[in-house]
Amino acid sequence: MSEYTFRIWRGDSASGEFVDYQTEVDDGMVVLDVLHRIQADQAGDMALRWNCKAGKCGSCGMEVNGKPKLACMTRMNTYLEEDVIIVQPLKTFPVIKDLVCDVSWNYDQNLKIRPFKPGPADSDGRYRMSQKDVDRVQEFRKCIECYLCQDVCHVLRDHKRTDVFVGPRFMIRAAGLDMHPLDVEDRIPDIRDEFGSGYCNITRCCTDVCPENINITDNAIIPLKERVADRYYDPIIWLSNKVSGLFQNGSRA
Amino acid sequence: MNADISEIQTFDHDVVVIGAGGAGLRAAIECSAQGLNTGMICKSLLGKAHTVMAEGGVAASLGHTDQRDNWKVHFRDTMRGGKFLNQWRMAELHARHAADRVRELEKWGAVFDRTPDGYINQRPFGGHRYPRLAHTGDRTGLEIIRTLQDYGIHQGIHVHQECTALKLLKDSGKISGVFGYWRETGRFVLFRTKAVIMCTGGAGKIWRVTSNSWEYTGDGMEMAYSAGAELIDMEFAQFHPTGMIWPLSVRGILVTEGVRGEGGVLLNSENERFMFNYTPDRFKEETADSPEEAQRWLDGDASARRPPELLTRDVVAKSIMKEVEAGRGSVHGGAYLDIASRRDGEYIKRKLPSMYHQFKELAEVDITKERMEVGPTLHYMMGGIAVDGDTQMTVVPGLFACGECTGGMHGANRLGGNSLSDLLVFGWLAGKGARDYIGQLSRPLQIVPEHIEEARREAVAPLNREGGENSYLLHEELQNIMNDVNIVRTADGLKRAIESLQELKPRLANIYAAGSSQYNPGWNQALSMRSMIMVAEAVARAALIREESRGAHTRLDFEGENEEWGNINILMCQNADGSMDARKVQRDVPPDHLAEIAYANLEDLEGGLHV
């Protein structure tokens, strides 16, 4: 057992301050355990979100010593006793109270994405997919919606362009649908115009913080950017679209 | 009395679904499909419910991995797993419809692992005769909740997030509203509605070692009970045999049964595969009796019988406890679970990625190289709100329930994988049930303002006191009391627990929460103490009444199953004076066609048509 100092942001959307708490830490504890102990002993009304305490629900995202982390998966033995551990809410989203912020914007982005639309089933009424094709999509579907990637995305965090870019979380959701072997919906125009694929500068900060180790940038965002480029900017495709467009127009006339 | 409720924010819905886990989402989707104006309220953010913790898979007799499987074998397995205490009709409906509900998920975008010929793959699991669990690695629950969520948000459901229900409101006996509060602001909210579907999950937080999150406080059971509904089978609480036990701070976190399904074995400190010593007579015919046979089964030999590690959860949990008692436990008082020596590292990482991650991050154990240490953890409540199998309605008109908060489907012990299928099937049925009920309502329902005033006064009381009981400490005391209502029980211990719970109740009236009502976990916890204590009392009382050992209920003073008790379920409800009434109810005689299947030879069922 050892004693640590936690410096936790307490306050709401109007005002707040960092408050120090001294607390005992036992072997094997994670940051969330310590926050619970502080809640029970010293600050019963300290707000924080958590659910599964096993890295599966993505509720307890916060910034610990400046790094976005899941509190339930951040072991205390990664910090030194003499360090002050600074805990604050995700910076990208407006604070509600203490460590809880308003993430409703994310739910709005999800609604923008056209839902899954399966093609026709096989003649026996069932769907077939190969595991290999499924593997690619399953990587994106591992996402636990903790929004740590949204928190570090420069477009959202620094440039505050929540009006034009849906953020890495929803780029991988779009990728998961676009690469779904059964899906037949066309989302490429949305990905360019509504989701803002062009805004990502491929700094890979989102990939670095993903607790599920999803290769967000390389496996989802870059392929989507390529699909957009193929559709809108490939000169040969552009030309053939023009020609076939003329042909179709001609045949209709 | 001033009972002005006009300033309370009010929503109008045809139906309000309380809870947004798998059951809530599936019920809400069905309600919406039936044309109902549907509201769904959830204590957390949407998509964070406990369903994400389900790992191993969803049980459905798709027959993709073994064509001999069909709904009848699934039904038979479920009844045998539940020690024949399940409600016949629920177990039948569940087994009949599970496969269609899983296929439907695929149409909504779920991505399950595949067989070599491209169909939904199925993995073996405890108590299931054939590989039956459709799965997505070891994060099937997440796949299902995300599929339902992403489909559901486009179905016109009104989702009210971070909203906690406190009380059901009635008009001359019929459900007419829900009263609750917003977590963010602490403000109260009223939902006028014609029907309520309770989908609030279990009450695992009354025990210390549990895989459940803070939300599992039994509030749905308490609200239904207080509104006049009955609870059934409350003595049956499932201890999952394999929870993490070290380090202490992660004690209770689930280790999926999928580890054993993929070939993992349980070992004691003497390196003995001890489960071979614990096969109950009822399962001997279908269980391997040597490591050699178990190995052949793992290698795909259809004539080999299943390894004993895949016996039902009650059996495995008790076996681990017995090994520990006999001095053959692991270093920290559990058993060793070994997959490292059974499968290669890449396979483990592909099929059990979350387990790999979880042990690596939380315990610094590499499960592709080392053994895990595991022990029983409270995981699921078989008992809960009693409902009609076909409609999911309780005895309270307009009150429906589905998922873990209900009782009856799983009897004395739930098979792994049967809870994800349970919530799909009964969520679907509850939506239909609510539609039928609402369709025959003849007059508009009223809200009685006094009922709200009472609930509001009770809710703000902890904030208005100068001091009093600390809710966190009270919760700890409750968990201590429940040590007597654990995996093994005695009359003395249960009586002691019931007495202590009585002493806890008056202290509830003096519970105190510091701070304001705005996003205040201390206050939220204070408000959930009442339901936790109610559920704890129901479990303890039912456990004291059932004088036998069956499934998840083990009495040291009444060993073994008793035939007479096999015909009895325990129902509980609230007396007019607020005390708890428990009564023994004779079970229905099963319809012939179900009895035949339940007691049939496997060979007859495998043909599918014989009975």
Image (cartoon, rainbow, N blue to C red):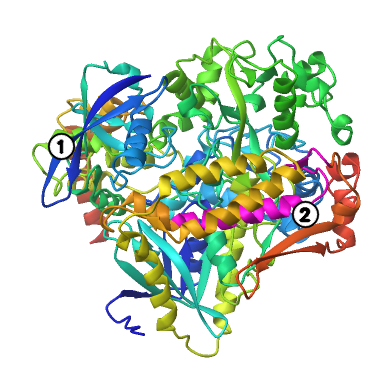
Spot occupied by residue B554 in the image (x, y as percentages of width and height): 76, 40
Q: Is residue B334 magenta?
A: no
Q: In this view, does B180 lie above or below A1?
A: below
Q: Mark 2 points at which residue?
A: B545
> Which mark, residue A18?
1
Residue at 57% in and 82% down: B173
| SS assignment at label 1 | strand
Amino acid type for the residue under numbered disc 2: Ile
In the picture, measured across the screen, residue B605 lies left or right of residue B457, that is right
Spot occupied by residue B11 in the image (x, y as percentages of width and height): 35, 74
* Residue A52 in view (yes/no): yes
Q: Is residue B225 above or below residue B604?
A: below
Q: Which chain carries label 1?
A: A
| SS assignment at label 2 | helix
Q: Is residue A91 above or below residue B328?
A: below
In the picture, measured across the screen, residue B512 lies left or right of residue B540, that is left
Amino acid type for the residue under numbered disc 1: Phe
Mark 1 to mark 2: distance in Å? Answer: 53 Å
Q: Mark 2 lies on which chain?
A: B
For the N terminus of chain B, give its image quadrant. bottom left
Range of residues picked out in magenta: B528-557
Q: For the stretch drawn in magenta, what is the main secondary structure?
A: helix
- In the foreground, B223 or B502: B502
Residue at 49% in and 14% down: B366
Q: Is residue B542 magenta?
A: yes
